Image: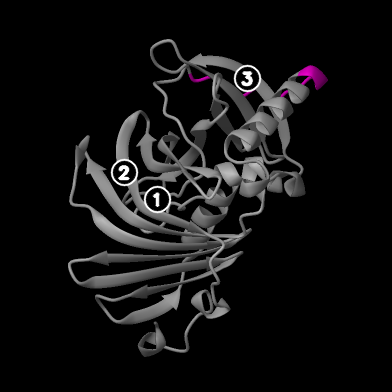
């Protein structure tokens, strides 16, 4: 489960725990030794059990409601209500409600559309937004636990244990794609729950053609069991160590009947429901 970095660089859940700062390690792109891969696979299997085992793997869709709160210079701003629909493996529709204005952002695979209630406009998403969604698909915990990464021939390796607060440790695995993009996932050493997601990417600078390298991090907290599935009700997002947002769920539902029309692009703005 995840709410991706939607309108304000966002994401949605599945997993839990929280952790402290991490010792960042440079990527070496060397093939993982068989023992490293085996250890990483064991951690993933334990993680699947921790979040619900077969109950988790049987989840086909997720409906989440709650508040998204952006942060500026470390300070929280006004929260924005959201309603999120996910159908695995590659469909997501997120609706935002702010000061009486509704925004709908929907993705299906390599396509996406956006409805802006402020301007009553409907249009296809720009290529960079599509790329954001694809990256979210790669980085979310579901991708790791459900094994979708195997379709792109990504490889696993075991990184080691990291400090995660007082008397706590996290086991860390790294997923590396053929194009060099990597993600590190931390799991609680005691409870096996997913606790953190870390990855590095380039971000375009405002009013410039230049880019900067940034480290993004999701810290997953407030685990709650719903229908046998453990989910994080709080997701904090950090860029280069500074918090930029928080997602706080009020409710999460699994395997609700969802019509295909939710994800289909309407004929025009007036047809958006």
Q: Nearer the viewer, residue 89 or 168?
A: 168
Q: Which residue is mark 2?
A: 245
Dot 3 falls on a residue whose secondary structure is strand
Q: Mark 2 near mark 1, Cβ–Cβ under 8 Å?
A: yes
> What residue lies at 44% left-to-right and 49% top-to-bottom?
11
Cα gap from disc 2 to disc 1, whole angstroms = 8 Å
In the picture, which quadrant includes the C terminus?
bottom left
Where 62 sits versus 222, above or below? below
Cα gap from disc 3 to disc 2, whole angstroms = 27 Å
On residue 10, the disc is 1
- Magenta stretch, main secondary structure, is loop
The x and y percentages for residue 20 are 39, 21
Q: Mark 3 near mark 1, Cβ–Cβ under 8 Å?
A: no
The x and y percentages for residue 94 are 41, 64
Dot 2 falls on a residue whose secondary structure is strand
Residue range highlighted in magenta: 24-35
> What residue lies at 57% left-to-right and 77% top-to-bottom?
260
Q: Which residue is mark 3?
A: 159
Where 184 sits versus 148, above or below? above
């Amino acid at each position: 489960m995840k709410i991706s970095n939607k309108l304000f660089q966002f994401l949605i859940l599945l997993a839990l725990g929280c952790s402290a700062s991490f010792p960042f390690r440079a990527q070496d792109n060397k093939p993982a030794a068989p023992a490293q891969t085996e250890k990483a696979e064991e951690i993933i299997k334990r993680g699947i059990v921790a979040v619900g085992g077969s109950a988790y793997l049987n989840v086909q869709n997720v409906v989440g409601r709650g508040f998204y709160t952006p942060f500026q210079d470390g300070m929280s701003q006004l929260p924005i209500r959201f309603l999120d629909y996910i159908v695995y493996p590659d469909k997501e529709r997120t609706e935002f409600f702010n000061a009486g204005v509704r925004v709908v952002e929907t993705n299906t695979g390599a396509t996406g559309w956006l409805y802006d209630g402020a301007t009553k406009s409907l249009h296809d998403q720009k290529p960079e937004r599509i790329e954001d969604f694809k990256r979210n698909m790669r980085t979310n915990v579901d991708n790791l636990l459900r094994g979708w990464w195997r379709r792109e021939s990504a490889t696993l390796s075991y990184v080691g244990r990291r400090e995660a607060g007082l008397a706590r440790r996290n086991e860390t695995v790294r997923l590396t794609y053929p194009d060099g993009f990597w993600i590190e996932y931390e799991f609680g050493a005691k409870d096996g729950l997913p606790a953190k997601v870390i990855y590095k990417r380039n971000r375009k600078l405002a009013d410039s053609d230049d880019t900067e390298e940034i480290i993004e991090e999701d810290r997953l907290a407030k685990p709650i069991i719903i229908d046998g599935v453990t989910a994080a009700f709080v997701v904090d997002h950090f860029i280069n160590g500074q918090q930029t947002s928080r997602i706080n769920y009020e409710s999460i539902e699994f395997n609700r009947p969802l019509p295909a029309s939710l994800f289909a692009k309407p004929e025009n703005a007036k047809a958006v429901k």
